[in-house]
Image (tube, helix red, strand yellow):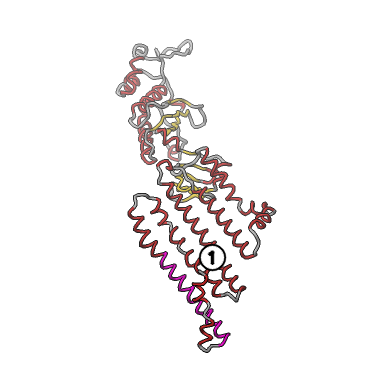
Amino acid sequence: MNHKLKFFFDLKEVFQNWGLSTQQSNTLNIVIGFLVILLLAYLSDIFVKWIIKIVLVRLVAKTKTVWDDILLEKRVFDRLSHLAPAIVLWYSAEYVLAGYEKTGNVIQVLLTLYMIIVSAMVVSSFMKGLNDIYQTFPNSAGKSIKGYIQIVILIVYCIAIILIISVITGSSPKALLTGLGAATAILMLIFKDAILGLVAGIQLSANDMLRIGDRITLPEYKTDGNVTEISLTTVKVMNFDNTVSTIPPYKLISESFINWRTMVESGGRRFNKYINIDVRTVAFAKPELLNRLKKFSYLKTILQELQADVGVDPAHDPGKERPEIVFDRTRVTNLLLFRKYTESLLRHHPLIRKDMTIAVYQRQPGETGIPVELLAYSSEIDWKLYEDMQGEILDHLYAVIQEFDLKIFQRPTGDDFRK
């Protein structure tokens, strides 16, 4: 090969036979040699790109696999083609600059640096394509490997930087790595977020704490939305107000957050509301109230059970003073009837899960009256439909509570004082 290439790169004798001086022959020989190797590099670049655009693209289009389309889209082969002219120039420069070792070494060093950078870019594109290929698998739903891909890319670029320094300084990579060992503290400081993100990503993935698509809530960061991206240094969350929160992964390990995934998977979203009852309106249910409440189908069962016991006025003779006040289960209160009615309403509602907890009970009374808590689980997970459902139930209870001779506690306003 050397003898074949020598004809192109050593034409000094030919030029001297034409009557040129030695200096002119050398200069013209170098110029023509450079033109030849540039032409060879250009032709190699055109040839390789032709293979990629004509042959490879058509071959990829005919295959049924997806991975080759992804690698082509990520420009892995396109970037790989940039190595062809550099290799041609690297091997050809020694023939053109045979008598100029320093200049030849500088050019080869520059070409070596170029090939290292291009190789790192090829590996980076391949790893990004590998991430997209992984996402085509069925078991990849919600599980991101982007953080691991990024740490591999980071390592590749670190190796590239070490090789570049090694080529420029002329020292071995092993010596550089030995020197970097003394600068570990500085490296830890520089790559702190990346290292913490890697560790946090492994913990999040191993414990299945976070997936793409999960709804999470972090009150401290005013974040409430769906996870759209999990990377080495950031977790992106699309909030419900269409803003995007960017959170370091290690924050999700060191601090608490709410993940609503189990709620979605269970098919039941908790419905938990309070209605504050005015204490002054709580009283024993009189016969006229019981008769009026018979029109509510939800109360038929409890009223039938009490019918035999409350056929007369529970207060007996209002004109006579009772000798003592004793606990009597037959003397039900309007608040008890309201709670029974509310529980029955929840049990008959089509969007309330019957196989999950349904309860209506009192909380500790306070300065805002008697809190009556409603606890159930909705089969409707969608946020808007869920809000519509609970609004429907509460609107109905606010309107029907007057039928029980009860009032909702509310602080007095200006109109109340004027009255």
Q: Is 163 on the left or on the right of 47, as rendered? A: right
Residue 134 magenta-drawn?
no
SS for callout 1:
helix
- The residue that disc 1 covers is 114
Q: Position of residue 326 (x, y in %)?
A: 47, 12
Image coordinates for residue 321, horizontal then vertical, percent: 45, 12
Numbered range of the magenta stretch: 21-48
Q: Is 98 rendered above or below residue 157? A: below
Say which of 57 and 41 sits in front. Answer: 41
Is 37 inside the magenta-drawn segment?
Answer: yes
Q: Quadrant of the C terminus?
A: top left
Residue furthest front in the image: 3
Q: Is residue 334 above or below residue 328?
A: below
Q: Nearer the viewer, residue 37 or 18?
A: 18
Give percent across and percent down for residue 183: 68, 54
Quadrant in the rendering for residue 62: bottom left
Q: Is residue 257 above or below residue 409?
A: below
